Amino acid sequence: MVTSKDTAIVARCHWCGDIPEYQHYHDTEWGYPVSDGRRLFEKICLEGFQAGLSWLTILRKREAFRAAFANFDAAKVARFGERDVERLLGDAGIIRHRGKIEAAINNAQRLLELLEQENSLAAFLWRFEPDPKTRPPKLTRDVLGTLALTPESIALSKELKRRGWKFVGPTTMYALMQAMGLVNDHEEGCASRALALRARKAFKVPT
């Protein structure tokens, strides 16, 4: 557990260390429920870009990603063509990986298809929320290290892949579930754990 100088947050999850970007992300975003479709699409894309890299790298490039991908407006990204791919491959502000860039564009197109069948991306994703009763009673650092794959993240990954999405493996989808508050993986003793739990209780699940 990491102690904070900020009196509003007494302790944090161990992964924050003393890195300001991690601390801010942890305190204000990670584990809190999200229903906004644009934010969710952004999270899916960024989790895909993070595969094999440090999340800190993504956080430090997030504003550049937003600028490069039309603020993650899926309707705009879905219209990106080869000229846009070449533009993005030349953008030093983001991760210049052709496969991941093309996956983000593909996923925007698949999202538009999904929205023809579903009320919202949020409503679709929140169906995969685990039953709290199936979660470990105490989320210690060691226990959390075993949760990179769960039945729900595997199911979400399979369903998205069936629909043609890319870079949405089960480990990546579990990271998404953590980031969007589908699971609350703040460690025992972390001050944000109770805050995220309170936010979840007040949250209306999209339908």
Image (cartoon, grey):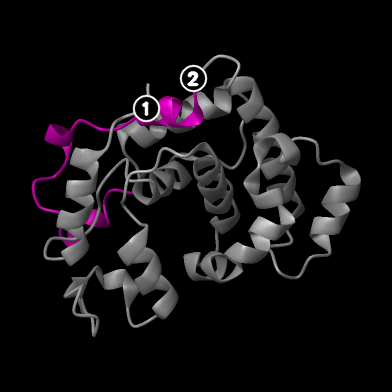
User: Residue 159: which disc?
Assistant: none
Relative to 207, is 1 on the left or the right?
A: left
Residue 143 is covered by the magenta coloring: yes
SS under mark 2: loop
Q: Name the residue under label 1.
A: 206
Q: Quadrant of residue 13?
A: bottom left
Above or below 129: residue 15: below
Query: Can residue 5 be spotted in the picture?
Result: yes
For image coordinates 49% across by 64% down, the residue present is 55
SS under mark 1: loop
Q: Which residue lies furthest to the left in this view?
A: 137
User: Which amino acid type corresponds to the residue marked 2 in the rendered image?
Assistant: Asn
What's the magenta region? Answer: 119-148
For image coordinates 23% across by 42% down, the residue present is 200
Q: Where is residue 154 in the image (x, y as percent from the top left)?
A: 40, 33
Does label 1 or label 2 sit earlier along the sequence? 2
Cβ–Cβ under 8 Å for marks 1 and 2: yes
Q: Mark 2 points at which residue?
A: 119
Residue 113 is covered by the magenta coloring: no
Total residue callouts: 2
Q: In which quarter of the image is the C terminus?
A: top left
